[in-house]
């Protein structure tokens, strides 16, 4: 899947070293395999956005925004190089 314009750095619970997420493919794997919350509107919205990107119906950076919302909802800390 396509990469995002600006990667995200996330820190899952219990993990000291941040994970750099560069696109929807990696984000989808994290949601499916390592995410602390596997339910809720933000989680489901992010998965739907990832599917829409793979079908060419949504820009990857829109899915990035949904991933950020899922992170906020799950209490997953994140940072980005675009934050001032």
Image (spheres, rainbow, N blue to C red):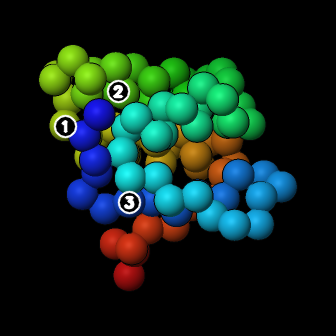
Taking 68 as reference, is 27 above or below it?
above
Label placed on residue 7: 3
Taking 11 as reference, is 70 above or below it?
above
Dot placed on the residue nearer the N-terminal end, 1 or 3: 3
Label placed on residue 59: 1
Residue 5 percent location from the top left of the image: 24, 57
Q: Nearer the viewer, mark 1 or mark 3?
A: 3
User: How far is the residue under mark 2 from the one under mark 1?
Assistant: 9 Å
In which image quadrant can residue 80 be found?
A: bottom left
In the structure shown, which secondary structural element does the residue marked by tag 1 occupy?
loop
Q: Residue at x 74, y 37 (%)?
A: 36
Q: Nearer the viewer, mark 2 or mark 3?
A: 3
Taking 80 as reference, is 1 above or below it?
above
User: How far is the residue under mark 2 from the one under mark 3?
Assistant: 17 Å
Residue 34 percent location from the top left of the image: 69, 36
Depth check: give the residue in front, 57 or 27: 27
Residue 16 percent location from the top left of the image: 76, 66
Q: Residue at x 28, y 47 (%)?
A: 3
With 9 as the anchor, is 64 left or right in this view? left
In the structure shown, which secondary structural element does the residue marked by tag 2 occupy?
helix
């Amino acid at each position: 899947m396509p990469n995002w314009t600006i990667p995200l750095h996330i820190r899952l619970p219990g993990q000291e070293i941040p994970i750099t997420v560069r696109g929807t493919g990696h984000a989808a794997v994290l949601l499916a395999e390592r995410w602390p919350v596997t339910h809720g509107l933000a989680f489901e919205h992010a998965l739907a956005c990832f599917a829409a990107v793979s079908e060419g119906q949504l820009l990857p950076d829109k899915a990035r925004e949904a991933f950020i919302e899922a992170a906020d909802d799950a209490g997953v800390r994140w940072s980005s190089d675009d934050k001032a």
